[in-house]
Image (cartoon, rainbow, N blue to C red):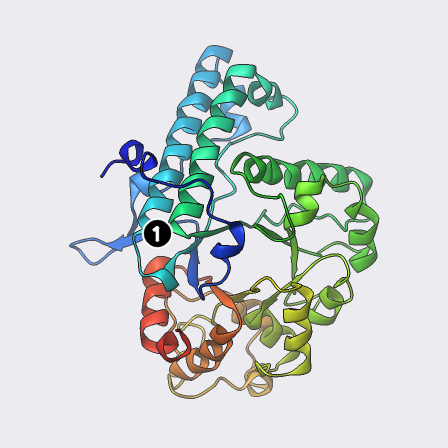
């Protein structure tokens, strides 16, 4: 069934709350498959295209605008197809993070005029609304994760202003999809990152739109602002626990029943929380037993660097780490952050999470 035909059979009135009750294991941004030659490859019609301000600035205005229009139409259609694909999976696999590159150069001063044009804005509003209807009708949980340059807690004023624009760009797309209407009906996740730390988030929080505030989540980092920094903002923002970041920073396989994890759950105020899961690359831990938990202090003593250990693997190769991560699926939706995308998340869900799912 085509996407257009599907809309006639969908109900736009499915509660966002219903989206959150089914446990899920998801993947980020790209849908991949294995080619006949055994190579990992993104599926073109399910994935986005992009461009840069530098390329656009070298073109005539007509060519540049035509390119942006083509990318806009392709990307929104690819999101519809991706949501439909994810919505056809088993219920516990209906979760996906959308790419931040859907509308290129949206926040660049020299190109923001393009996205404010009435016909372009009307197209976005109409078609993103269809994405939201589709996701809610198929019970697919969606999210965004703005990139590393979205630093709301920066101590540099210009960086803060640009970061607010970047976050509100994601909030615009979220709003058009029909989300952001209540606390955590959609997740837009960032790191604290900036030198002002948690106080920087408090300082900027009131400047965000209501939809942005409803969707904001904070993820613990591997070097600077850890789990306790995020939890110090529990009165404003829920915490996304990244268990790999926590292991890198504190050397701990945090227990799913610990008080700190309970505090993370409480920060979501009754909404099912999301957790991020990745594992160190197998080619960094060469020869390590796949059935043994890597010993963080011993790895550092032997010369491994945190910067190398933090990099995400293609697949979830370590069974012991997988079994530990799977214990969180009782209380959390798990966003799998791995290079093999859906192929890795499907395998992890099938081999390690089944006994925790209803």
**Residue at position x 62%, y 64% from top?**
270
Q: In which quarter of the image is residue 12?
A: top left
Say above or below: 42 vs 58: below
Task: Answer yes or no: is residue 85 visible.
Answer: yes
Percent of width and height locating residue 351:
32, 76
| Residue for badge 1 | 86
Q: Categorize mark 1 by other alpha carbons within 10 Å: few (<14), some (14-19), many (20+).
A: many
**Residue at position x 41%, y 52% from top?**
139
Say above or below: 347 vs 152: below
Residue 294 located left or right of residue 215: left
Q: In which quarter of the image is the N terminus?
A: top left
Task: Answer yes or no: is residue 340 visible.
Answer: no
Front-most of residues 18 and 155: 18
Q: In which quarter of the image is residue 112?
A: top right
Q: Residue furthest left?
A: 36
The mark total stands at 1
Identify the element where label 1 is drawn: helix
Percent of width and height locating residue 86:
35, 52
Say above or below: 254 vs 44: below
Percent of width and height locating residue 72:
44, 28
Say above or below: 271 vs 227: above
Front-most of residues 350 and 337: 350
**Residue at position x 39%, y 23% from top?**
70
Front-most of residues 6 and 340: 6
Q: In which quarter of the image is the C terminus?
A: bottom left
Percent of width and height locating residue 64:
47, 18
């Amino acid at each position: 069934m085509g996407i257009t035909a599907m809309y006639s059979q969908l109900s736009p009135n499915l509660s966002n709350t219903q989206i959150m009750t089914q446990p899920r294991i998801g993947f980020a941004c790209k849908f991949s498959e294995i080619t006949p030659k055994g190579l990992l490859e993104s599926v073109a019609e399910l994935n986005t295209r992009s461009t840069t301000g530098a390329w656009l600035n070298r073109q005539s205005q007509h060519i540049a605008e035509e390119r942006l229009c083509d990318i806009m139409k392709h990307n929104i259609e690819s999101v519809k197809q991706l949501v439909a694909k994810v919505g056809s999976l088993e219920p516990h696999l209906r979760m996906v993070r959308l790419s931040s590159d859907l509308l290129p150069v949206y926040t660049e001063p020299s190109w923001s005029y393009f996205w404010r044009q009435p016909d372009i804005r009307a197209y976005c509003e109409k078609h993103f609304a269809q994405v939201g209807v589709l996701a809610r009708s198929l019970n697919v949980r969606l999210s965004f994760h703005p990139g590393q340059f979205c630093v709301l807690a920066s101590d540099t004023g210009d960086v803060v202003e640009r970061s607010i624009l970047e976050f509100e760009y994601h909030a615009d797309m979220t709003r058009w999809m029909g989300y952001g209407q209540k606390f955590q009906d959609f997740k837009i996740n960032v790191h604290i990152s900036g030198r002002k730390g948690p106080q920087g988030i408090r300082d900027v929080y009131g400047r965000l739109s209501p939809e942005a505030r409803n969707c904001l989540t904070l993820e613990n980092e591997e070097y600077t602002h850890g789990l306790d920094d995020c939890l110090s903002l529990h009165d404003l923002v829920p915490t996304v626990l990244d268990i790999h970041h926590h292991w890198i920073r504190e050397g701990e396989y945090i227990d799913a029943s610990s008080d700190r994890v309970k505090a993370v759950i409480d920060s979501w105020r009754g909404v099912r929380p999301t957790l991020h899961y990745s594992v160190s690359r197998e080619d960094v831990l060469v020869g390590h037993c796949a059935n043994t938990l890597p010993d963080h202090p011993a790895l550092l003593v032997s010369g491994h660097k945190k910067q190398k250990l933090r990099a995400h693997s293609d697949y979830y190769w370590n069974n012991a780490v997988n079994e530990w991560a799977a214990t969180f699926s009782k209380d959390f939706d798990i966003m799998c952050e791995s290079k093999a995308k859906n192929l890795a998340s499907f395998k992890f869900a099938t081999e390690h999470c089944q006994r925790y799912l209803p």
